[in-house]
Image: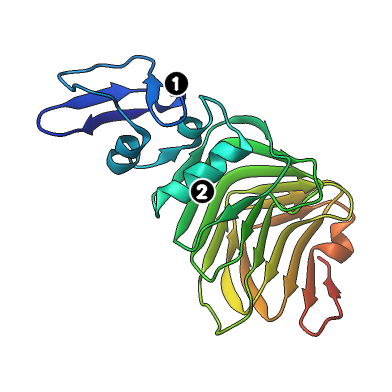
Amino acid sequence: YMSILPWAGADYFNYRAHDITSDGGNITGFDNITNTGYGGTLRSADLIAKSPWVDVRAYGAGSVTLAGVQAAVDAAAGIPVLIPAGNHSFNGTVTLPNTRVRIVGDNAVINQPGSVPTFLQAYHVYTEISGIRFTGNGNGFKFNATPTTTMYRDFLIDRCQFAMDSGVYGIYLYGPRTGYIQNSLFEGAGNGIYLQSVCLPFVVNTTFKGTNYLANAIIYDGDGVGTSCGI
């Protein structure tokens, strides 16, 4: 629940964030809405400005879509982006912007049927992803920034699960950077973490479950030749 949102003057709203509908710009419906005097049309910009997070359904006509998530991430400007519980399929990539990004899943499951990453970060900016289970044929998360100066603590992957198809890495990290992968799980037929170009994450309280991870939990490629690190 998102409760008691202060609006202009004495106007307040109390509604359930998971019952938002949209017509592509205006918020057209709330379940259990209480309006104490607000007049006019509530727009997505209002919701972003006054809420602690951006719900992707405000950009997907009430549902979770690839285009809706992309639009929410682009509009968030550093505010956390919420992906609600449920099974969602993204046949494509959400490209993260050149601003601080925080994506929070509420026990969301995202399947990627294509051989492309679900989330792609091509910039050297702090990025945080939590609470999502990734499945399918593409990386759950990929950093693909051009190596420049080393970035310290510029990503956090927390409370995520990766159950990828055979041969697919849950996380692909490229570029001179450090960050944290914590409280997470890698299982199933896929591989774990691929590291390229002096990327050194701290892996904390994370489980690799399955016989394939005996050889493919972490692959380090600092010189163009991958070196396996099992568990």
Assign a secondary structure to mark 1: helix
Measuring from the top left, give residue 50's x and y in whole percent: 27, 39
Relative to 175, is 46 above or below?
Answer: above
Residue 183 shows in this picture: no
Q: Residue at x 49, y 48 (%)?
A: 73
Residue 220 or residue 35, whichever sits in front: 35
Specify the amino acid type for callout 2. Ile
Q: In 3D space, how far apart are the residues under numbered discs 2 and 1 (Cα atoms)?
A: 19 Å
Q: Which mark is residue 63?
A: none
Specify how the rendered protein is coloured. Answer: rainbow
Q: Would you call the spot at circle 1 few (<14 residues within 10 Å), some (14-19), or many (20 or more)?
A: some
Residue drawn 38% across and 18% down? Answer: 30
What number is the disc on residue 103? 2
Residue type of the residue flagged with mark 1? Asp
In the image, taking residue 23 as reference, residue 140 lies left or right, namely right
Q: Report which residue position mark 1 lands on.
A: 19
Picture residue at 10% right of the left edge, 28% below the top: 10
Looking at the image, which residue sits at the far left? 9
Residue 45 quadrant: top left
Earlier along the polypeptide chain: callout 2 or callout 1?
1
Q: Are marks 2 and 1 in contact (CB under 8 Å)?
A: no
Secondary element at tag 2: strand
Q: Provide residue 159's location: percent of width, then percent of height.
A: 58, 49
Front-lying residue, 29 or 128: 29
Determine the image quadrant of residue 15: top left
